[in-house]
């Protein structure tokens, strides 16, 4: 079984994988106007709830024999997508209204042609900034008058895709749930590579001898394994675990009676991390040296 991200799941790649009788699970891009993606999303059907954050629905298309399509839906992601889009549209509406109001005020206030020309150039620069914005430009269109407006058709199309992603597979035996969870394994593998390169800084390797490089890679792999074990046992992300445990400090108190080295009291969140991981928390007092 081969797992492919959406960027590599072209028809040629999928056909190549099945030449020797193998199977694949591949992600499909839903926003590139693909006929298969449009047909799969248009099919009616009932979602099956797999877990709190995942619902799946299988559809079959006559124009793609031998392939199965699974639509996955994450309700929490749908809410996030909707909020991000609404925030972007509010920013665009506010900026377009500001440009329009300023243009109308200057049309009445400015008398000379040169002043109106300079003002118009400023409006055009503001509109160009919107068009070139990396996240806002996707919601804009140019009207027949040359002005910018929100692309309501694009907004309506995106609403249908909130929280959804489309998978396809050639395996006739996997259930829709197994297809979805199997593809999530690819996401976990990709996250592991990202963590190795960023959180654990696997590269660059500052060693020249082969046995030292091998030891460095092995240690990074073991640390990644421990991170995943901690995440699964506690139900928290590593960033959250690291942030909580990083607030624990060892404090040295010195006075006339002597010296005491102790750790800061554990918060309920920190205590639960140790408890869920099955690790004994640090002692409250590590060293006591009377004078």
Image (tube, rainbow, N blue to C red):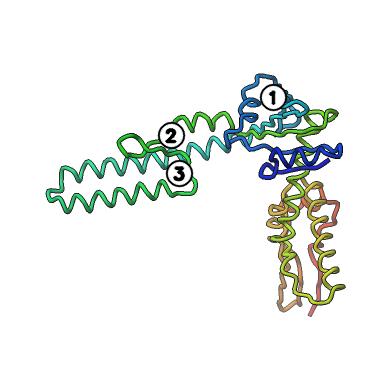
Assign a secondary structure to mark 2.
loop
Marks 1,2: beta carbons within 8 A: no
Quadrant placement of the C terminus: bottom right
Q: Nearer the viewer, residue 43 or 284?
A: 43
- Estimate the x, y position of residue 42 in percent, counting from the top left: 62, 23
Assign a secondary structure to mark 1.
loop
- Residue at 80% x, 63% y: name it: 220
Considering only order in the chain, which callout, 1 or 3, is on the residue closer to the N terminus? 1
- Estimate the x, y position of residue 281 in percent, counting from the top left: 81, 58
Marks 3,1: beta carbons within 8 A: no
Horizontal relation, residue 63 to residue 140: left or right: right
Quadrant placement of the N terminus: top right
Separation (CA) of disc 1 from disc 2 = 31 Å
Please name the residue that numbered disc 1 is placed on.
Answer: 63
Sort mark 1 into few (<14), some (14-19) or many (20+) by Cα contacts within 10 Å: few
Q: Nearer the viewer, mark 1 or mark 2?
A: 1
- Residue at 66% x, 33% y: name it: 74
Separation (CA) of disc 3 from disc 1 = 34 Å
Q: Is residue 201 above or below residue 14?
A: below
Please name the residue that numbered disc 3 is placed on.
Answer: 137
Considering only order in the chain, which callout, 2 or 1, is on the residue closer to the N terminus? 1
Give me the disc on residue 253. Answer: none
Please name the residue that numbered disc 2 is placed on.
Answer: 151
């Amino acid at each position: 079984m081969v797992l492919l991200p959406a960027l590599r799941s072209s028809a040629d790649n999928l056909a190549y994988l099945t030449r020797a009788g193998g199977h694949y699970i591949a992600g499909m891009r839903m926003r590139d106007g693909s006929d298969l993606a449009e047909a799969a999303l248009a099919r009616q059907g009932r979602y099956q709830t797999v877990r709190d954050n995942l619902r799946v629905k299988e559809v079959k298309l006559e124009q793609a024999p031998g392939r199965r399509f699974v639509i996955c839906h994450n309700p929490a992601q749908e809410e996030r997508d909707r909020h991000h889009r609404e925030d972007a549209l509010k920013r665009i509406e506010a900026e377009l209204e500001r440009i329009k109001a300023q243009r109308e005020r200057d049309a009445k206030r400015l008398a000379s042609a040169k002043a109106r020309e300079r003002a118009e150039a400023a409006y055009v620069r503001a509109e160009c900034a919107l068009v070139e914005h990396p996240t806002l430009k996707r919601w804009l269109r140019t009207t027949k008058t040359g002005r910018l407006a929100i692309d309501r058709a694009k907004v309506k199309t995106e609403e249908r895709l909130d929280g959804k992603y489309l998978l396809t597979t050639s395996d006739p035996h996997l259930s829709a749930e197994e297809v979805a969870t199997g593809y999530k394994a690819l996401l976990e593998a990709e996250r592991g590579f990202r963590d190795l390169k960023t959180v654990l800084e696997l590269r660059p390797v500052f060693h020249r001898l082969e046995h030292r490089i091998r030891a460095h890679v092995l240690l990074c792999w073991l640390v990644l394994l421990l991170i995943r074990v901690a995440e699964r046992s506690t139900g928290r992300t590593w960033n959250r675990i690291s942030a909580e445990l990083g607030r624990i400090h060892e404090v040295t108190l010195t006075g006339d009676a002597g010296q005491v080295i102790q750790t800061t009291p554990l918060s309920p969140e920190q205590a639960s991390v140790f408890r869920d991981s099955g690790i004994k928390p640090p002692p409250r007092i590590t060293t006591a040296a009377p004078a």
